[in-house]
Amino acid sequence: MNNTLVVILICILLVLVCFRYYVSSKRSLDAMRRQIKILTDDLDKVTEKSKLQSGRWQAASNVLEEALLFVDSRLNVIYASPIAVHIFGDLSDSAVSIVSYTHSEEFEIECRGVVSSDKDTELYQWQSKFNDKVFQVRALKFNDGAIVALSDVSDLHYLEQVKRDMFANISHELRTPLTSIRLLLDMLLDQDKSGEVTSFLQKISTETEVLKEMAQELLDISLIESGRFAIKLDSVTTTPLIMSAIERLQPQADSKSIDFCVAEYTDVPVWSDADQIQRVLGNIFHNAIKFTPSDGKVIVSAIAEDEYVRIETQDSGPGIHPDDVPRIFERFFRADRTRKGAGTGLGLAIANHIVQAHGGSIWASNSSEHGARITFTLLRSDR
């Protein structure tokens, strides 16, 4: 009887333990199911949100006129917009390298510079050529990669080329008749004429020189913009450069009774293409004389600094309007509001190109006394 009771009690205990284990397991399973459901719901929400964001981004990239590429830190393309696909082809592998996708090592080098940069807010710009088309590229680093936008500027590039060719053709077409006119004028001036006729001929000669200079400026800007403007650097001193330019412009200064002088000079040698720096000085001096009233002054200085020689030209004219100061080195820009006169508006633009090709810089300002000041620098060759 006792053994039977013990067996019964043991069975009851086993039932209770199993029941408790069942209840506990069910609770754990229910809790796990609830947790899984929560995670699944969260995942669905994230997935839905991701799909929504992806859809919005896809729609936005479809209407953009630029080709967009996302690259990671290893220069693998992780996204290409439809226009990018049209240019480079399908992005079959999300881990394809930028050089394999674009077939351009130069483009890869530019992108590498963006990705490896420590400046997250700097916008990088350059031009690249793909399939005989020219693209303006803008790139910005973000997180561990970069976004790259490409705009097709082939038409603009073509129009720029047409414009440069037009300038060159106009210049060549003008130079021949102007040379003939100049020769005829010289012949007439050599003959004995009355004072009035001689004065008229001299005025015609002066205007012919102006036209000849305009034709040369059109040719120069065409050569500069096409990259065919050759610079040959030699070590020369600044004094002969300045004095030679002054000598050429002295008759113009004398005709207006302008005091054209050198206030300070140095014989420190600089790296210079003498003929081209003569062009720079000639353009600057010509403007200074043109805008300086009669009996005024044009003062030139050459000052040696640590790595440069700074050459300044200051006139006593009306100065430059403050709004025009940042623009006077632009092509075809003329500061008509305060400094009127004939010209193409190319003289200072050409001077700017030449000085930059020499490794120097050029800028304009108004002096504290009166008039405008044009300053440019040349690298010293003794350092």
Image (cartoon, rainbow, N blue to C red):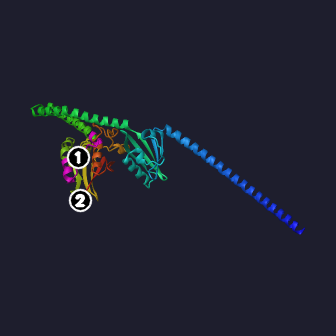
Q: Secondary structure at mark 2?
A: loop
* Residue linked to disc 2: 382
Question: 186 above or below 354?
Answer: above
160 drawn magenta: no
- Looking at the image, the residue that sits furthest to the left is 192
* Residue 265 shows in the view: no
The picture places residue 306, in percent across and down from the top left corner, at: 29, 59
Using the rendered view, name the quadrant where residue 187 is placed. Answer: top left
Q: Quadrant of the C terminus?
A: bottom left
Using the rendered view, name the quadrant where residue 28 is placed. Answer: bottom right
In depth, the one of 105 and 201 nearer the eye is 105
Left or right: 196 in relation to 347: left
In depth, the one of 261 and 242 nearer the eye is 242
| Residue under the image location 52 percent in, 40 percent down | 60
The picture places residue 111, in percent across and down from the top left corner, at: 41, 49
Left or right: 71 in relation to 105: right
Residue 202, which numbered label? none
Q: Quadrant of the N terminus?
A: bottom right
Q: Which residues are magenta?
A: 222-244
Q: CA distance from mark 1 to mark 2?
A: 20 Å
The picture places residue 186, in percent across and down from the top left corner, at: 13, 34
> Which residue type carries mark 2?
Asp
> Which residue type carries mark 1?
Gln
* Residue linked to disc 1: 276
231 drawn magenta: yes
